[in-house]
């Protein structure tokens, strides 16, 4: 159980509630970022990430760079695609739109295949798009945090490999890594970008990514240099390789305290089989979704097969406003997030359920959140139809 000072329970889709030991790791004394102790910890973090991504392919490469999840979009845009090359972005909401915008900044010719709100593009239309044009890469937002829609990766990647084998398969896993299964090698993915503060359970500030040997080759064979200095993966590649080989190396100063926190969290995550961790998130999510349905509420992600397991986006009853329910929850010490998908932003709220809130049920976060939601709705006169 937690010994943190009393605070509202943060149940938004990231940052999530943190484990005490993870937070305590951040009070590590200052040390040199090229000293042997720190280099060893950073090296262990990189090898742990290979396990988190279920990868044993030596040609694949983890990267941990100071920045938020958004930096992952810049890594892809600046390094994996050259100006004028085509990208197919599977449109699931706010975050896939953001990825598309980031790619355009680097001159990518972006086609967005947009699904109706609350769903995801389907394989036949993706197949047709891949046959109609040659794409350097395809991006998929594994969990679009604006809708709670979960995209399927295995069959998608198989389709891309059969229809358009040169196209790189890139995943925005910011809201899925460490709560949804990702088998990087088996599913033949080329890149997954994520961040520290969501299911990985570490304070915000780290861009964490994993790229295939094929993706690294695509960068090495660029015709033009990347239009970035800090986000140049060729500058970071030798640094990451050196850290993993426990050799000191410098390009830009990492945050030792955040790396310590990530080390602690990854050690915890890998201390139980990943399948167990994913199953716990799935079971808790099923219970939450059943409770939401029992309250008579609908989810933004309409198809049960497309529902994320680390968050739930919930439509409010028509008679209740966000400006009523969030303050009411807040009085009960529960913090949910409002909507961010521009077409429905005022109509729904988001409940994040990842990490310790799921893995330490003795904290009572989920029961308290569901009960507070039910009471809050009743305060404003909501009765289940
Ligand atoms: C949170 C999130 C991002 C952006 O991450 P930041 O850390 O806020 O920059 C990108 N994609 C998805 C799917 C997210 O959930």
Image (cartoon, rainbow, N blue to C red):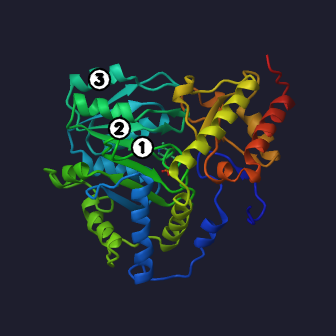
Would residue 73 be seen by someone viewing this image from the given angle? no
Label 2, secondary structure: give it. strand
Label 3, secondary structure: give it. helix
Q: Is residue 347 above or below residue 168?
A: above
Q: Mark 1: is the Cβ under 8 angstroms from ligand 1?
A: yes
Kindly indicate the quadrant of the structure image that contains residue 186.
top left
**Residue at horizontal 51%, vertical 61%?**
266
First in sequence: mark 3 vs mark 2: 3
**Residue at horizontal 73%, vertical 51%?**
9
Kindly indicate the quadrant of the structure image that contains residue 146.
top right
Would residue 347 be seen by someone viewing this image from the given angle? yes
Q: Marks 3 and 1: which is nearer the front?
A: 3
Q: CA distance from mark 3 to mark 2?
A: 14 Å
Q: Is residue 258 above or below residue 310?
A: below
Q: Is residue 37 above or below residue 213?
A: below
Q: Which mark is residue 226?
A: none
Within-10-Å neighbours for mark 1: few <14, some 14–19, many 20+: many
Label 1, secondary structure: give it. strand
Residue contact at pointers 2 and 1, CB within 8 angstroms: yes
Q: Position of residue 324 (x, y in %)?
A: 77, 34
First in sequence: mark 2 vs mark 1: 2
Q: Which mark is residue 127?
A: 3
On screen, residue 335 versus residue 275, left or right, reads: right
Depth check: give the residue in front, 303 or 385: 303
Residue that mark 1 sits on: 172
On screen, residue 303 versus residue 102, left or right, reads: right
Q: Which mark is residue 139?
A: 2
């Amino acid at each position: 159980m937690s010994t943190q000072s009393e605070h509202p329970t943060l149940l938004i889709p990231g940052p999530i509630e943190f484990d005490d030991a993870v937070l305590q790791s951040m009070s590590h004394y200052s040390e040199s970022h090229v000293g042997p102790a720190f280099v060893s910890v950073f090296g262990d973090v990189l090898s742990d990430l290979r396990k988190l991504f279920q990868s044993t392919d030596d040609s694949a490469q983890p990267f941990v760079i100071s920045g938020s999840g958004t930096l992952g979009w810049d890594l892809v845009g600046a390094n994996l695609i050259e100006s004028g090359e085509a990208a197919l972005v599977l449109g699931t909401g706010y975050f896939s739109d953001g990825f598309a915008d980031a790619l355009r900044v680097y001159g990518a010719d972006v086609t967005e295949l947009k699904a109706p709100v609350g769903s995801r593009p389907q394989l036949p239309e993706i197949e047709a798009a891949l046959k109609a044009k040659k794409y350097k890469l395809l991006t998929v937002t594994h969990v679009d945090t604006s809708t709670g829609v979960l995209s399927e990766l295995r069959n998608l990647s198989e389709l891309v490999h059969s229809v358009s084998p040169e196209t790189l398969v890139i995943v925005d896993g910011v809201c899925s890594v460490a709560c949804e299964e990702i088998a990087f090698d088996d599913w033949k993915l080329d890149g997954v970008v994520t961040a520290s503060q969501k299911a990985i359970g570490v304070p915000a500030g780290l861009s964490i990514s994993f790229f295939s040997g094929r993706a690294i080759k695509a960068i090495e064979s660029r015709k033009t240099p990347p239009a970035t200095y800090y986000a140049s993966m060729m500058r970071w590649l030798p640094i990451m390789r050196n850290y993993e080989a426990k050799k000191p190396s410098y390009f830009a100063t990492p945050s030792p305290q955040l790396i310590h926190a990530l080390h602690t969290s990854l050690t915890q995550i890998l201390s139980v089989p990943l399948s167990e961790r994913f199953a716990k998130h799935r079971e808790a999510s099923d219970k939450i979704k059943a409770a939401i349905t029992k309250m008579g509420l609908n989810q933004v992600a309409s198809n049960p097969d497309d529902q994320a397991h680390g968050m739930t986006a919930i439509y409010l009853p028509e008679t209740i406003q966000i400006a009523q329910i969030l303050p009411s929850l807040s009085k009960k010490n529960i913090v949910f997030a409002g909507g961010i998908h521009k077409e429905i932003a005022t109509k729904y709220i988001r409940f994040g359920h990842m990490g310790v809130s799921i893995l330490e049920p003795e904290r009572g976060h989920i029961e308290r959140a569901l009960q507070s939601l039910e009471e809050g709705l009743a305060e404003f006169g909501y009765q289940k139809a």
